[in-house]
Image (cartoon, rainbow, N blue to C red):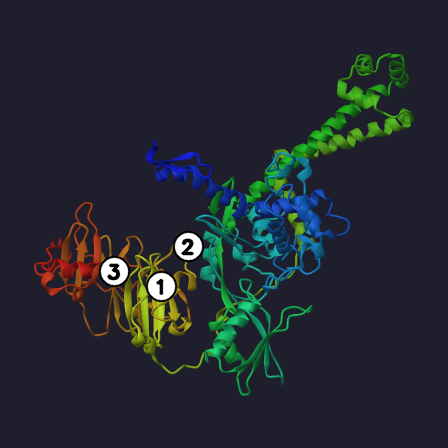
Amino acid sequence: MAKARKDIKKSGTGTPAIIHDSPITHTLETNYMPYVMSVIVSRAIPEIDGFKPAHRKLLYTMFKMGLLTGNRIKSADVVGQTMKLNPHGDGAIYETLVRLTRGNEALLHPFIDSKGSFGKQYSKMAYAASRYTEVKLDLICQELFSGIDKDAVDMMDNYNGTTKEPVLFPTSFPNVLVSPNTGIAVGLASSICSFNLAEMCETTIALIQKPQHDLSATLPAPDFSTGAQLLYNKHEMDAIYSSGRGSIRLRSKYRVVPNQQCIEIYEIPYSTTVEAIIDKIAKLVKGGKLKEINDVRDETDLGGLKLTIDIKRGVEPDKLMAKLFKRTDLECNFPCNFNILIGGTPRLMGIREILQEWHGFRCECLKREIYFDLMVKNDKLHVLMGLEKILLDIDKAISIIRKTENDKDVIPNLCKGFDIDEPQAEFIADIRLRNLNKEHILSRVAEMDTLKAEIKRLEGILKSEQKLNNLIIEQLRVVQKKYGIPRKTEIISGKEAQLIVSEEKEEAYQVYVVMTKEGYFKRITLQSIRGSDDQKLKDGDEIVYSGEISSECELLFFTDQGQLYKAKVGEFENVKASALGEYVPAKLEFEANERVIFFMPEINFEGRLMIGFENGKALSIPLSQYQTKTNRRKLTGVFNITSPVVGMIPVEKGKTKDVFILTKHMRAAYLPGSLIPEKATRTSAGNQIFVLKKGDYVEKFVAADQIPPSSLKGCRKLKVPTPGAIYNPVNVEENQLIME
């Protein structure tokens, strides 16, 4: 229970305010967690219909305004009306609207037909104010609202209870995988790439007909509105399809203009902008790393994107583009993280699971829509059956109405006179006088046979899963034929995906590098480090590697997820010792919560790497296992992750290193490096070299030359597995400095 402090502070009004101490768990539960769930559920993460609440409120408002047909209206009018559902301000609403427009080119299938300047997905160019632009709903929105007025989805109160809005849209196609969507919540993110509509419809149909259908047969790869080329990697694509996580590599398209000494970039990756590319190229030219370029400029016009690079005489365009692909966002990644809200709960799903969820959702929507139609037709049939009864004696019905003195008695008298119920009597009483002729009544009664047949058909669909699936397939075929477009993103693989020409090898030079425990990397010139070696670090951070290396070295970053990220020295900018450096997880696009556990530079990959695990196992792997012929930036499965890695020790070719092991319970062993078993497979679990007692685990696995020799006495062991010995460091202070 929270208790009041003895000290009392005065509030702004002069009233004494008591400050209460409260457990942090209580504060998190009452204040923080509601905020977290609000961001996840109500703002950042899309649902199975492919929309976030902001998108849904905007499109539904436009639907209710009648903008599915007719002429465009001012965007400002739409924004104003949307505020009845979305109270977060006109700026946020208009920004949402911009992204959904045809003019912005962010979507393969825009939902809003637009007129005016809406900026571009591939540019940071500002869009015009809402008072200058005009919008209406695009035709594809018919597929979003199909059945929405027939109770196909639940409705809920808006924020102030003055009107209703849909919880979801009953989309007739899996829009969740057709429209790209990104969102960052609290401790959770979502990044969904877009797929070609025609291919997605075909894949969904195939899965409905055959649940074990091979997805890649009909859905080869994502498709983006900005086009470009997708560098196809089957292993990575299969991982994305199955787990919902991974990375897609995209490369710009270019053409060489004959006799003009220039290159034109006309399609760029979805995840970058023209301005970012130009800024990077300009920076490289200024730094003397791209001497082949005279000028770079944006010549985008109504004809589309065009980024022109003027090159010097004698420069080979393909060779220059190879450099640019490596060093700029002309080639970059699109991260995939298929987090979707299902029933208010975020779930990370692969494509097959997403389509299964959508299929279940669509079935429910159709059942509700069919049930609604069934009820309407049953009600109509019912009143027509009453009309059929008065056909026998129309004059009697007229007589009953004429002879009834009070209006309230008309319905009861008709019910009594013809043995019909109140709804039937209400229908008969409301018939206009001119329609009380035999011909009109007979024509209405003739509808009964049609209604009975339709009711039987609808009941059959509700009772048959196969018929319901056939209806979904039929609708998907219509969408595919009506709205399907050819792929915009070209798929390349194999030799086509490799850089056409390798970069010229630069002259090697020495550079000073620093790597910190928290993941910050510094590249410092030798001149700068000699001037000042006072390294700036974040609070609580420490240096794990520092020293001079060759610019030819590959930088190897091993992570706690069993992955290896590789980078060139030249990819990092020179900084001063007084700078924090570049954050490696962000620069190399680590996965969420992934961190560096070991760093090393390497040139020839001729040595070995000894790895120690928390469970007392260890192994030695040839460094050649981490060498690749292609310029792969990421390797998976570089070591076994069944037990956390506690240390890595690089060993040069032809040399050995003794090993020091220390456990949580202060048991230690000093072992010859030759006892560490060599393995040819990277994912081997290793051999048991240290016998651990219950509750104990290895804390340190380091080279023995890092430990004071006096502290190693009594710990030397010549056989494995070993239980070690009680660790009693002779020089406590010296040892602590090293162990920290």
Real-space Cα separation, disc 3 to disc 1, in angstroms = 19 Å
Residue 708 x/y as whole percent = 13, 64
Q: Hey, which quadrant is residue 393 in on the image?
A: top right
Question: In the image, what residue type sits under mark 1?
Answer: Tyr
Q: Residue at (72%, 44%) from the top-left corner?
A: 65
Foreground disc of the pair 3, 1: 1
In screen coordinates, is 706 left or right of 322? left
Q: Hey, which quadrant is residue 673 in on the image?
A: bottom left
Residue position for label 1: 520
> Mark on residue 647?
3
Residue reaching furthest to the bottom: 314
Task: Give the tally of numbered discs.
Answer: 3
Residue 76 x/y as whole percent = 69, 51
> Mark on residue 592?
2
In screen coordinates, is 663 left or right of 567? left
SS at mark 2? loop
SS at mark 3? strand
In screen coordinates, is 427 left or right of 119? right
Q: Residue at (54%, 57%) from the top-left corner?
A: 217
Question: In the image, what residue type sits under mark 3?
Answer: Gly
Residue nearest the viewer, comparing 506 with 299: 299
Q: Earlier in the sequence, mark 1 or mark 2?
A: 1
SS at mark 1? strand
Question: In the image, what residue type sits under mark 2?
Answer: Ala
Q: Earlier in the sequence, mark 3 or mark 1?
A: 1
> Mark on residue 273?
none
Q: Is residue 585 visible?
A: yes
